Image: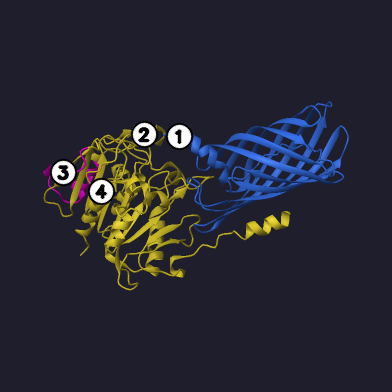
Chain colours: A yellow, B blue
Amino acid sequence: MVVVVGIGLVGCVPSPDRCVDQSRSAGERLECTVPGWTDRGTYLHLPDDWDGVTPAPAIVLLHGAGGSRQGADLVTCPDGDDASPACLAALATAAGYLVIVPDGTGQRPVRRLRSWNAGGGDAGLACLSPIPCRLDVDDLAYLDDVLAEVELAAPIDPARLYAAGLSNGAAMSHRLACEWPGRLAAIATVGGQNQHADAGGACAGDTPVLDVHGVDDPIWPYAGGVSEVVPDQGVYTSAATTMEGWRQRNGCAETFVEVELPDVDPDDGTRVVQRTWDGCDATTVHLAVDGGGHTWPGGHQYFGVDTIGRVTRDLGSEALLAFFEAHARP
Amino acid sequence: MRGRSAVALASLAAAGCGTLTSYQSAEPVEPGRWRVAAALTGGGFADREQASRLPFAQAELEVRRGVAEDTDVGLKLYTVGAEVSGRHRLRAGRWQWAMAGAVGGIRNRDRALVTDGLLLHARATTIATRRTSARWAFSAAPTLTLSRYWFDGGGAASGLLLGATANAERRLGARWRLVPELGVHATVAGEVPLVGFVGHLGVGVAVDL
């Protein structure tokens, strides 16, 4: 019996594939491994009109702490429905983008509670998230390897590489913009700020930034400080500090234009106020979601309102995509 | 969120570890007889390197059959995996000694919190049992557990746990037994299921058929 069970189980041993070793066709989602990195798979969504040859714009979509590549996709989808055409991946692939959704470092023993080393750990700010920080995981090198691996399978337009993420994934996107000067065409961040730079980390700037943050975010407080939901994570930087940093690094004036966006869904309990700084070398925009929580615009209410706050329905992933569409590296 | 997450994690965390429980003594099931047992176990993981802690809960159902004098085999189904085992008594009497071995595994796929992959383990145990009366027996079992996790996301990792379980067996009538147990295991090499400690406390019930 032991032998039979043993053979049966060994027959289940996964034989993971690199993207380049898989058959690829337009509109598919591949699950790929990244050589040299253990248990850190990546989704690669191929554009609906992908021809396999023409370099395509690409979005690196980063999950939040405790998330995974599966969660990163779902959190952008209304009602968590991954078949919805309003998911970021669906919208982006329809518009010709590659969407790359990698895994962060997993918490043992379950390993699907993942997070990024988004930096920090100085100036009174926590290093986020604690586990990859403690292990000193080089997520810049990892994401570099992810992109190199994707490039082998699906050419990326080097002038149109973008990063986006929620929470810890947003903080990692800020860090990428800081530490990959001239490489990202823009970032779109939701519910997470530039912990790396605000703690004194090097940050090059000159990257267009669209930053979205719920004013009533109970997890990453809009005004910074200690989270009421996860106080053991330490001190978070504020939206104001991060945006002031980007204003300066992106060469903006101190003045800005502030407009209240249309209340598309009057029942969602949120209003979005857009602040666009004047005279920037790189576009710098902040969307403050009054009444909004730690949620993706137009996305999934993945926990109750009492825990993560509200999802705004006044805008969605199409707003982030429009920002990317408007920005390319020369 | 913390309370809800803790419950969800506790029920799933065992899927990242396998089973480390015993609820056995050195006394095998008599040849030709069956024993059915069930147990509920709670515990925690503490990863030294990641400085993270996670609770777990596990339910299990086991069937054992005596296959020869002093030897039995068993099949255990636990929360999300399966294990087969064998036990052979080396010495009978007031002090009893047995050797036991087990192999088991979990195929994790599409579990919300647990990474996809195949987790296999093999365990070797020496069980010492002291029967103090017709009703009571006490057992201690040093255990070595080797685990290997093949990840769908690429690569594999291994780990070796050294630990022990201790339990008390209280007979309830001629056929029933109640077995409370505790166990502690520490990683001595590798990182599966973690780099640190696993502790458990539980209670089992067995009936001879």
Q: Give how far apart the Cα atoms at labels 2 and 4 are.
A: 21 Å
As displayed, is residue A279 above or below residue B133? below
Q: Amino acid at mark 3?
A: Pro
Are the numbered discs 1 and 3 placed on the same chain, yes or no?
A: no
Asked if disc 2 and disc 4 are in contact, CB closer than 8 Å, the reply is no
Q: Which of disc 3 and disc 2 is earlier in sequence?
A: 3
Chain for disc number 3:
A
Q: Give how far apart the Cα atoms at labels 4 and 1 are.
A: 28 Å
Point 31% across, 42% down: residue: A295
Circle on res. B4: 1
Discs 2/3, front: 3
Q: Which residues are magenta?
A: A240-266
Q: Give how far apart the Cα atoms at labels 3 and 4 are.
A: 13 Å
As displayed, is residue A284 above or below residue A43? above
Are the numbered discs 2 and 4 placed on the same chain, yes or no?
A: yes
Point 81% across, 38% down: residue: B27
Asked if disc 2 and disc 1 are in contact, CB closer than 8 Å, the reply is yes
Q: Amino acid at mark 2?
A: Thr
Circle on res. A307: 2
Percent position of residue A282, x then y: 18, 54
Chain for disc number 4:
A
- Disc 3 target residue: A262
Are the numbered discs 4 and 1 placed on the same chain, yes or no?
A: no
Task: Provide the secondary structure element on which disc 1 rests.
Answer: helix
Circle on res. A316: 4
Q: Is residue B122 left or right of residue A287?
A: right
Mark 2: few/some/many CA within 10 Å (<14, 14-19, 20+): some
Q: Amino acid at mark 1?
A: Arg
Task: Provide the secondary structure element on which disc 3 rests.
Answer: loop
